[in-house]
Amino acid sequence: MINIDDLKNSYERINKYLVDTPIVSSDVLNNELNAKIYLKNEVEQLTGSFKIRGALSALSNLKNQGVEGVVAYSSGNHAQGVSKAAQIFDMHAIIVMPEDAPSNKINKTKANGAEVVLYKRHVESREDIALDIAHEKNYPLVKPFDNEDIIAGQGSFGLEACTFFQANDIKPDIVLSCTSGGGLVAGTSIAFKHYFPDVEIYPVEPATCNDTEISLLNKTRTRIKHDRSTICDALEVEIPGQITFPINMKNCKAGISVTDQEVCSAMKYLYEEFYIKAEPSGCVSLAAILSKKLNITNKTVLVTISGGNVDEESFQEYLKLAENHK
């Protein structure tokens, strides 16, 4: 199992490329929920999401092994992370993306120099397509979460947050992490459980694809077939990762799920109170506390804002949905 030394070694390789993203707080939010809440804002990260952390970690190791190109599949943020890391390390990247992915995510991936192959979401298998390309090109497949280097890289988020809490002599009680396959929460949990063993860690997902929540309840990886989509396009997976789940089973208290409407309300709150423009997937952790899915009274809480890759038209639409639901 990946440990704290793996996280530290990864961070040594990649930290010069990363933004040590800010942790922000608000008296208004704290008073509203009667808690001390800290938000770590990965909207300000290189490529606009935490995914660059894992991508840099994985590709830096592959580059050191003489690998010249990689294949990945992603709905957007891992695509941008891998394409940017490939650009940094002068490697060829081929990314398999759903044709309905937000156009800004596709365009930014191409702008980083990657070759993009589109597929039909819920119809074709992105993994099968990527594996075929990887075999044909003789390139390794860099999975979005089931990869030890990726998990160690995502753990840099947790290392930075732990450093903040230690430097300010603050003991966190609860960590909320946006979750798809579980890479970010796995890496983050390794850091927090090392420095703050009593902390409670909660993965947060959309209600229509809460595979981690169900799997943690069942104590085994459980596939969730979902026929309803969610505005949280970056969090649409059917089953937690083989590598990530045992880590999360060990370190996480329970899963939490939120509705798209609750996510829209969180996006609006985040924008109005913090002037942070986050994508829906980046707001599920905030949605969990705003909709009171967890009792955080008198607790110190870290909320993950995991990314901000949303186009202006969609963003305004989500704010309107939140407004109309008032």
Image (cartoon, grey):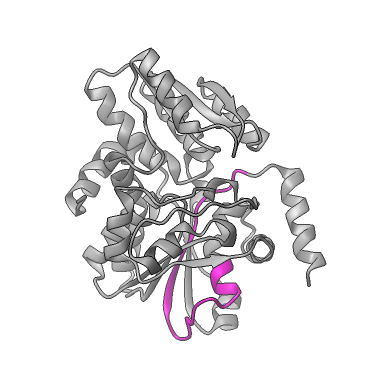
Residue 55 occupies quadrant: top left
Q: Position of residue 44 (x, y in %)?
A: 52, 47
Residue 300 in the magenta stretch? The answer is yes
Res. 152 visible in picture: yes
x then y, percent, for residue 11: 27, 44
Residue occupying the point 36% across, 23% down: 89
Residue drawn at the location 62% of the way across and 28% of the way down: 107
For this orientation, the residue located farthest to the left is 5
Outermost residue to the top: 137
For residue 90, side relative to residue 9 (left or right): right
Along the viewing direction, whichever of 32 and 264 lies nearer the viewer: 264
Q: Nearer the viewer, residue 129 or 142?
A: 129
Residues rendered magenta in the picture: 287-309
* Residue 165 lies within the magenta run: no
Q: Is residue 178 left or right of residue 217?
A: right
Vertical placement of residue 223 versus 79, above or below:
below
Q: How many marks?
A: 0
Q: Indicate left or right for 31 with 312 as reference.
A: left
Viewer-closest of 183 and 108: 183
Q: Quadrant of the C terminus?
A: bottom right
Q: Residue at x 36, y 18 (%)?
A: 135
Tell me if I can see residue 278 in this picture: no
